[in-house]
Each structure stands twice: as C-alpha cells, then as structure tokens.
Amino acid sequence: MYGTDWLALLLLLAIVMLLFLLFNAVMRKWLQVEKKKLFSYNHINEKHKKMDWTIRVVFLVVLLLGNFINVTREPMEWKYAVNKKDYIFTISQLIFGVLLILTVIQNNFGD
C-alpha cells in the first residue's frame, strides 16, 4: 500500500514537472524569450545589485551561524527517544524535503 502511494506521488511530481517544462518551452517560443540561467547576475541597477548581494551575504552568514550552533549542540533525538529509529525517520524526512525543494528550484519555480 505504501509503495503505491510513493509511486503515485513520484508520478504526480513527474507529470507536474513535465507540464511546467512543456509550458515554459511553448511560452518561450511563442513570446520569443530566451532562457535565462538559474543563478544569473542580471542586475537592473546599482540598488538592485547591492540588495542582491546583501541578501546573499546575510543568507550565507545565517547558514554558517546555524551550522555552527547545530554542530556544538548535543544530538538529542537518538539519545532520548523511546524508539531508537525515530532519528532515521527524521533524517529521511529532511532528505526528502531537500530533494523536493531542489526539484522545485531546478525547475525555476515553474518559470
């Protein structure tokens, strides 16, 4: 039962991604718009450039700070959980979430 649920979800995601890709290709051709890179440096003006780099630097600092905080903390779930395999479920959720987000990002959020 659970295998078919995963298969249905993967099929649904594949169909949605395919529809987005087809839509993008048709609209790009119809409107004669060239495909842009995912991480481009096409700044409109200096203010846009400064804001873009500010957001990038702040995000990087927060990411590094969060990583430092998490590394220095004591691991909790595997140590105190009643079911010792709960941490495996949590890690699998994290991996799935990251893959799902990367899939959406890879497809340019449907652009």
Image (cartoon, rainbow, N blue to C red):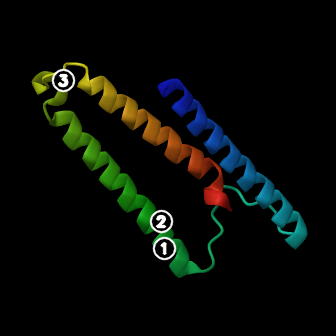
Q: Quadrant of residue 97?
A: top left
**Residue topped by disc 2:** 53
Label 2: state its secondary structure.
helix
- Is 35 or 27 nearer to us in this picture? 27
Where residue 28 appears, as percent x and y from the top left, is 83, 65
Residue type highlighted by circle 1? Lys
Label disc, if present, on residue 78 of the rendered structure:
3
- Whichever of labels 1 and 3 marks the residue nearer the N terminus, that label is 1
Whether label 1 touches label 2, CB < 8 Å: yes
Between marks 2 and 3 in the image, the one whose residue lies nearer the viewer: 3
- Is 19 or 77 nearer to us in this picture? 19
Numbered-mark total: 3
- Whichever of labels 2 and 3 marks the residue nearer the N terminus, that label is 2
Label 3: state its secondary structure.
helix
Is residue 42 depicted above or below 75 in this figure? below
Q: Gap between marks 1 and 3, in whole Å? A: 43 Å
Would you call the spot at circle 3 few (<14 residues within 10 Å), some (14-19), or many (20 or more)?
A: few
Q: Residue at x 70, y 56 (%)?
A: 37
Residue type highlighted by circle 2? Trp
Indicate the quadrant containing the C terminus: top left, top right, bottom left or bottom right: bottom right
Between marks 1 and 3 in the image, the one whose residue lies nearer the viewer: 3
Whether label 1 touches label 3, CB < 8 Å: no
Q: Quadrant of residue 73?
A: top left
Where residue 102 appears, as percent x and y from the top left, is 54, 44
